[in-house]
Image (tube, rainbow, N blue to C red):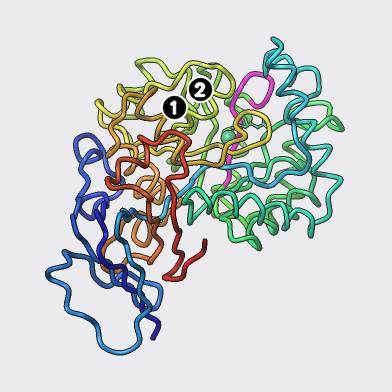
Amino acid sequence: MSRLLVRNLAQLATPAGTDAPLRGRALGEVEVVSDAYLLCEDGRVTAVGRMRDLEPPEGDVEEIDGRGRCAIPGLVDCHTHACFAGDRVEEFALRAAGASYEELHAAGGGILSTVRATRGATEGELVEVVRQHGGWMLEHGTTTFEAKSGYGLDRETELASLRAIRAAGGLPTWLGAHAVPPEFASADDYLDYALSEVLPDAARVADAADVFLEQGAFDVAQARRYLEACREAGLALRLHGDQFTEMGAITLALELGARSVDHLEATGPDGVRALATSAVAGVLLPASALFLGRPMPPARALIDAGAAVALATDFNPGSAFCESLPLVCSLACTQLRMSPAEALAACTVNAAHVLGLAGRKGRLAPGYDADFVLLDAPDWRYLAYHMAGTVVAETVLAGRTAR
Ligand code: NIG
Ligand code: FE
C-alpha cells in the first residue's frame, strides 16, 4: 500500500456536501479545516481532519509538511482546445492593432489557420504538444483536463487528435463541428462527410461531442443533426453557444439533454431563465471574453436563478491562450461577481460534473481521488486573490507529487 500524509496545513478547503452539481447558495459553501491534515492511500483520500485529531498511521508513510500552505482539490478544466499545432501570435498582434476575431475568421485566418498547421503535424507531434500543454496546466494546479479536437476537420487529423489527447492524459471531446473546412462547399456537405466517415471511429475514442453554434460556423438545424447523431453513437453532448450571438443554443441543449452549454457571453434574460431551471450546466470562460475584449457572461444572474455553473479556461491558440484556472478564478471574482467559494466549486466539483466524474473528482473527502493542490498561501482564497501569482506550490495526482 502507498500512503501519503500531509501535516500542518494552514487550511484545507473543499466544496461542502456530496451533491453535484452545486447550485444557488450551495455553490458558495466551502468547508474549511484549519491546522489540518490530509491522508491518502493508494491514490484515494482516506481521511481529512484537524491535526489534533490525527492518529498517526503505522507503517510506511510518505510525509509532506504543509506549514504555511493550504490544500484544495485538484482543479478540473472541463473546456480546453489543447490539441493544436502552430500558434496565432501574428493574429494576436493584428487584433491588438484593431482587427476583430470575427474579421480574421471570415478572412480564412482564425480557426482555419490552426487547422492548416494541425493537419501538417504527425500524431506523435500532437501527443507531444498535448503533453506540453497538460504540463503547463499542471503547473497551475489542473489535475484533470478535457480537450477537444476540432483543428483537424478531416478523418485522419480528427482521429489522431482524439487519440493524442487520450495518450497525453486528457479526456477527449470530438469537436467535429468547429468550422467548415475549405474543401467543402457547405456546412451540410461537410457534416455528411463527418458523420459518415469520422463519427463511427471518433465515438470509440471520445467521451463527448461538441459543436460551435454560431454565425459563420453551424446553425441550429446543423447542430441538431450533428448532436443527435453523436448522441446515437453514445457520446455525451456539449455546445459552444451564445458566444457572439444568441442563436438558440440553450433551447437546443435542453431539447437534447446536453451536459453543458459553454461561453454564454451573449445570453439574455430568457436564456438565463431557461438554463437555470434545467439540468444543463453553463460553462463560463472569462479568460476568453477578456482575451477577445468581449462582454463577460451573466454569471451572477445565472447563479442567483439557480443554474449549475462551471468555470474553465477555454485554452486555445486564438481566443484564450491561457492555461491558468487560478487566473480564471481571479477573473470570476473581479469580473463575474462570483465569490472565491463559488469560483472554487465551479472549477472543481461542478467542472467534474460536466465531465461525468463528480463521484471521483472535485472534492477533498474520503473516497475521492487523491488529486490536490498545495497553495503557497496562508488562506485558500489566495487561489483567486493572488492574481497571476505563483500561488501553486505543489500538485499531487493520484497520491503522487506531480510537480
Ligand atoms: O471556444 N469559439 C470557438 N472555438 C474556440 C476558439 C478557437 C480558436 O479561435 O481557435 C473558443 O473560443
Ligand atoms: Fe471553446
**Magenta part mainly helix, strand or loop?**
loop
**Which residue, as the protein is rendered here, is positioned at the far left?**
53
Mark found first going from the N terminus, 1 or 2:
2
- Which residue is at the far front? 68
Judged by depth in the image, the label closer to the viewer, 1 or 2, is: 2
Looking at the picture, which amino acid does disc 1 mark? Thr
Give x and y (percent) for residue 234. Answer: 54, 55
| Quadrant of res 345 | top left
The amino acid type, in three-letter code, at marker 2 is: Asp
Label 2 crowd bin: few (<14), some (14–19), many (20+), radius 10 Å: many
Can you tell which mark lies on residue 251?
Answer: 1
Q: Is residue 323 left or right of residue 184?
A: left
Q: Which residues are magenta?
A: 209-218
Assign a secondary structure to mark 2.
loop
Q: Nearer the viewer, residue 310 or 380?
A: 380
Magenta span includes 391: no
- Taking the spot 40% from the left edge, 82% from the top edge, the residue there is 2
The quadrant of the rendered image in which ligand 2 is seen is: top right
Q: Quadrant of the N terminus?
A: bottom left
Q: Is residue 213 magenta?
A: yes
**Mark 1 sits near ligand 1, with its Cβ under 8 Å away:** no
> Residue drawn 38% across and 56% down?
374
Residue at image position (30%, 46%) is 380
Residue 389 percent location from the top left of the image: 46, 39
Check disc 2 and report the residue beneath it: 242
